[in-house]
Image: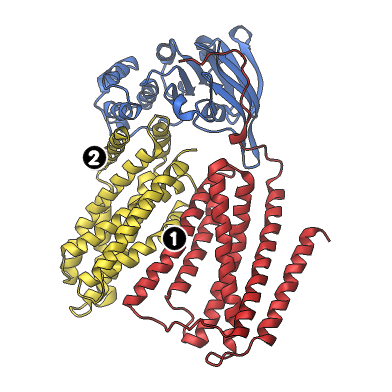
Chain colours: A red, B blue, C yellow
């Protein structure tokens, strides 16, 4: 097995351990019942999704500053993996909402901003695909990524504020007793490990897909022209 | 003395190579023609030389400056006539040039001079959308010389011009360094001392007027 | 610096002159919003009681769709592409050019709002107050900056009808939330108008600054 396969196997192994913790170690919630166990993966997934977006943001900023192809590749990898985790977060959120709130969807701050995150990822990937491949796609995507990263907390804040004007579904108390907290932290660590492994693998795929592209022109060597006075 | 030196200019669009390792040196005041079939890479090359586009790799020095880093400074001294005229149809010929004179930071007097040079004084107040294709091309050429550039890059300027294309271009090209892409071999011969021939993105060679075979 | 302002104004004047002479956009937008109001009336069964709670939603829906058209047009036409490049080949800074186009698009959308707001007041019997107008104008500024930035981006890409809303709407949500709330309160609902307006101002400042910084990456190669 090469190191990518080993990394993937390790990440999967960790997730299996996390699943064990969720179902065997963590106690059942008194108020919400077994459905509450979704919470561990749902929130971990959400954190991984935002984390991936931070990778996209970082890659984008570095790319705009110095045209680093590696930074752009990292952003690409982060976006794809992030979209996966955002989808997981949304689906789990909906599965949890139905028994608890009685409806699959509610316009609360978390669900809304996660949906917005999903839409921004989708826009990011579409722009990458439709723009002129190479510099233009990288540049435009970086701008989308930066605006998107700033937008998500602003949307979250806006909806929270709006909810103070229009009270909505009851916010669930997030305070956790010891065993639940431990389970959650463990699950979150495993999920982040999984996300890291996925990004690393995706980065490798992108590197291979890019092929033997010549160095980006921003780093082109200056032409030596010998004795020459600049024309005024 | 070379005013433009290109070294290994290469342009990729995704996985497609549009230009491969073009080397070029143009002297001050020289007129160079670029010939080639459609799709040979003429427009791609000209856009890079005019600093309208960046190459994927390679070096370009214009007037002693690194063209990839000093684009803003160089653009003051470069005039570019692109494939499409890019004029504002609702504005008159005069208003089009006045607008660009504001952007270029050149005095308004240049507008009337330029209109006269390209032979559009009579139709100065006509909306650009109502001008014939040839007149629009003249206007685009006029816009390119509004700021009296030292280097002029023309992408098939003769495409819509009539039989007096050669005279107009001679007048416009006078006293400037020019790179001119065209399909018209005779025009290239008449206006330019040297010719670069492109095929499938590669340079097939440069030749002086005497050596061009029709 | 003053040169940049002169350039931005020249660009704005050029766009507004072109629109004045062709009179394409503003009449089309005005017609669209009036149509939207008429449809809403039949779709929602408006009466004097529920009008104040439905009207704000109709207002913002109409504004968002009109905005997408207005800002999409700012950079859209293929001709604009060759002329945009011609503008970039001059010493004019991309930020100045962007500001000029955003200013023109804003003014054109305000022209549309000058029809929308009175028509809304007329058809739905809701008030037309300075409070409502202020909220709408403030939101328009930020929405214009964002709409024009992404319009410049998608103008170079295929599938722009799909991409422009996809990219722009997530960024417009804060404006719609705050602006919607402000208009609701101005029409009689409970809530905090001043807070909503302050939010709009904050969003305006943030996104005008950000789009100005991003303009040169989007406009130039």
Residue C20 drawn at (x, y percent): 23, 42
Q: Residue furthest top?
A: B210
Which residue was labeled with disc 2? Answer: C21
Per the rendering, the mark at residue B129 is none
The chain letter for the residue carrying disc 2 is: C
Which image quadrant is residue A40 in?
bottom right
Separation (CA) of disc 1 from disc 2: 38 Å
Residue located 61% across and 90% down the image: A28
Quadrant including the C terminus of chain A: top left
Q: Is disc 2 placed on a helix, strand or loop? A: helix
On screen, residue C42 versus residue A146, left or right, reads left
Residue A227 drawn at (x, y percent): 60, 12
Question: Is circle 1 on the same chain as circle 2?
Answer: no
Which image quadrant is residue C80 in?
top left
Which residue was labeled with disc 1? Answer: A151
Q: Is disc 1 placed on a helix, strand or loop? A: helix
Local crowd at mark 1 within 10 Å, few (<14), some, or many (≥20)? many
């Amino acid at each position: 097995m090469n190191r990518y396969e080993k990394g993937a196997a390790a990440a999967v192994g960790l997730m299996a351990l996390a699943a064990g913790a969720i179902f065997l170690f963590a106690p059942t919630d008194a108020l919400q019942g077994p459905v509450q166990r979704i919470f561990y993966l749902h929130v971990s997934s959400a954190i991984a999704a935002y984390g991936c977006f931070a990778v996209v943001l970082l890659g984008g900023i570095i790319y705009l500053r110095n045209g680093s192809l590696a930074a752009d590749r990292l952003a690409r990898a982060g976006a794809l993996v992030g979209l996966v985790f955002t989808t997981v977060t949304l689906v789990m959120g909906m599965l949890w909402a139905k028994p608890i709130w009685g409806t699959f969807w509610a316009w609360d701050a978390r669900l809304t901003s996660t949906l917005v995150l999903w839409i921004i990822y989708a826009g990011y990937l579409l722009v990458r695909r439709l723009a002129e491949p190479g510099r233009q796609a990288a540049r435009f995507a970086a701008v989308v990524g930066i605006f998107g990263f700033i937008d998500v907390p602003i949307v979250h804040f806006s909806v929270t504020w709006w909810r103070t004007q229009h009270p909505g579904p009851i916010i669930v108390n997030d305070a956790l007793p010891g065993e639940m907290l431990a389970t959650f932290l463990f699950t979150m660590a495993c999920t982040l490990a999984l996300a890291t492994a996925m990004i690393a693998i995706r980065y490798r795929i992108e590197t291979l897909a890019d092929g033997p592209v010549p160095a980006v022109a921003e780093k082109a060597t200056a032409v030596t022209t010998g004795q020459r006075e600049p024309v005024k | 003395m070379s005013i433009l030196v290109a070294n290994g200019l290469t342009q990729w669009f995704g996985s497609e190579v549009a230009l491969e390792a073009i080397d070029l040196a143009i002297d001050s005041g020289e007129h160079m023609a670029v010939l080639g079939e459609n799709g040979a890479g003429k427009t791609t090359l000209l856009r890079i030389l005019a600093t309208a586009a960046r190459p994927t790799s390679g070096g370009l020095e214009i007037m002693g400056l690194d063209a990839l880093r000093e684009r803003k400074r160089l653009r003051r001294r470069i005039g570019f006539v692109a494939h499409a005229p890019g004029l504002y149809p609702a504005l008159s010929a005069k208003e089009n040039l006045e607008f660009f004179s504001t952007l270029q930071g050149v005095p308004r007097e240049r507008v009337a001079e330029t209109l006269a040079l390209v032979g559009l004084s009579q139709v100065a107040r006509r909306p650009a959308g109502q001008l014939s294709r040839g007149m629009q091309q003249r206007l685009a050429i006029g816009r390119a010389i509004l700021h009296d550039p030292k280097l002029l890059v023309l992408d098939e300027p003769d495409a819509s011009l009539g039989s007096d294309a050669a005279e107009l271009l001679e007048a416009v090209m006078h006293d400037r360094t020019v790179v001119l892409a065209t399909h018209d071999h005779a025009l290239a011969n008449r206006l330019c001392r040297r010719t670069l021939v492109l095929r499938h993105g590669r340079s097939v060679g440069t030749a002086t007027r005497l050596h061009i075979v029709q | 610096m003053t040169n940049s302002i002169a350039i931005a104004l020249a660009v704005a004047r050029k766009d507004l002159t072109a629109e004045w002479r062709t009179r394409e956009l503003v009449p089309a937008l005005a017609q669209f919003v009036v149509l939207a109001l008429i449809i809403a009336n039949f779709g929602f069964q408006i009466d004097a009681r529920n009008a104040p709670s439905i009207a704000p939603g109709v207002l913002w829906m109409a504004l968002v769709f009109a905005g997408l058209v207005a800002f999409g047009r700012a950079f859209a036409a293929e001709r604009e592409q060759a002329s945009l490049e011609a503008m970039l080949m001059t010493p004019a800074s991309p930020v100045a050019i962007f500001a000029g186009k955003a200013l023109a698009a804003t003014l054109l959308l305000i022209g549309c709002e000058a029809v929308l707001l009175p028509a809304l007041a007329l058809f739905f019997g809701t008030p037309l107050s300075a409070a409502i107008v202020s909220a709408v104008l403030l939101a328009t500024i930020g929405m214009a900056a964002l709409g024009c930035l992404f319009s410049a981006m998608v103008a170079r890409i295929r599938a722009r009808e799909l991409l422009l809303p996809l990219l722009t709407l997530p960024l417009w949500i804060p404006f719609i939330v705050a602006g919607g709330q402000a208009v609701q309160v101005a029409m009689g609902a409970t809530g905090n108008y001043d807070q909503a307006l302050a939010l709009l101002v904050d969003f305006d400042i943030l996104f005008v600054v950000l789009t100005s910084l991003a303009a040169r990456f989007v406009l130039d190669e």
